[in-house]
Image: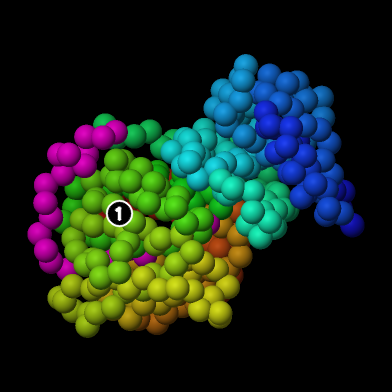
Amino acid sequence: MSEPIKVLIVDDSAFNRRSVAQALGASPEVRVVGTAADGEEALRLVSALRPDVITLDLEMPKMDGFTFLRILMSKMPTPVIVVSSYAQKENVFRALELGALDFIAKPDRHLDMEMVGVRGALLQKVLLVRSLRPDSLSRARSSEPLSAGLLSAQRPRAPRVAPRHLVAIASSTGGPTALMEIFAKLPERRSVAAVVAQHMPEKFTRTFAERLDRRSHLSVSEAQDGDEVTEQTAFVCPGRKCMELEGEGGSSIARLRIRFPDPSDRYVPSADRLLTSAAQVAGPRTIGVILTGMGDDGLQGARAIREAGGRVIAESEETAVVYGMPGAVVRGGLANDVLPLPAIAAWLAALGG
């Protein structure tokens, strides 16, 4: 067996430090090597203990989590999993932009059943570090806002017509920052719409969609049942739900259907369901994009897009934080193009040009 994963827990709450330590310490694959109550203490322990992964609270005295992240990623890049309440949604995405790998949402109330789910999800994300590329943290991803807050106000109303190109995107771990980079570079085009299945907890997807909206020329929102997929629109699937397109194809405007997951859905939101339905509605006008993430969600959807005459782009191992999802598509021989993230953004930006 490989050595246990060394974890450093950073949280100003003694109760939270103890809870996280108990949740992770129960696994023989994990060893908690230290705890810290603030960012200053954490930096000293990172230097001394060299942990494989850090769990991080953002609101702490002396040195908060954001300052800690900036210093850590510039001097000692280490995978960081943010442990956040639902009330800190904006802070979570700011932390991801600063280099955090992923986040876990803890309930506002310490209910036993909810905490069991949190402990399992946290352990799963910690174990994920075994799948990271060695240099995945050294490649900082830029997601600077495009005149944050101005794009939405200045965006002209798009015509109510079906898009010439439908971009269906699948992403998981590392996906939020990748999506922000892509959406920030999409120019003003009236021939494109996008739908996104990003593995993310409920209550965070609306905030994430709003954040994308402020960075994009497209009108981005969390999807609602019955939304029309028209030119210059983009939709993020709500957390703990699945999203499908419904329509007759051709020049007709497709609608979104938001469903509860089926027992057969291995991932929620399901990229396979989204991409497959996109292929059925848009056929050869469909462009499937498989970004970073663990597992193989999107593999069956990519196959459906290719069979419908559409195009599939997989993120290359060069930039994917976790090569699971795009790697599965590449190994399956379903990718028309295998591109690093900046090239994917440039390719999509050229659509309709």
Residue 158 part of the magenta segment: yes
**Circle 1: residue type:** Ser
Characterize the local packing of mark 1: few (<14), some (14-19) or many (20 or more) Cα atoms within 10 angstroms: many
**Residue 101 location, x and y as percent?**
59, 43
Reading the image, the residue beneath label 1 is 221
Quadrant holding the N terminus: bottom right
Write the residue at 16% across / 44% down.
155
Q: Quadrant of residue 352?
A: bottom left
Residue 333 appears in the rendering: no
Report the residue that reaches farthest toward the right: 1
What element does badge 1 sit on? strand
Residue stretch in magenta: 148-172
Left or right: residue 334 compared with residue 37 = left
Q: In the rendered image of this protein, does residue 256 appear above or below residue 304?
A: above
Q: Residue at x 11, y 51 (%)?
A: 157
Q: What residue is drawn where x is 57% and y is 29%? A: 59
Placement of 249 over or under 67, stated as above or below:
below
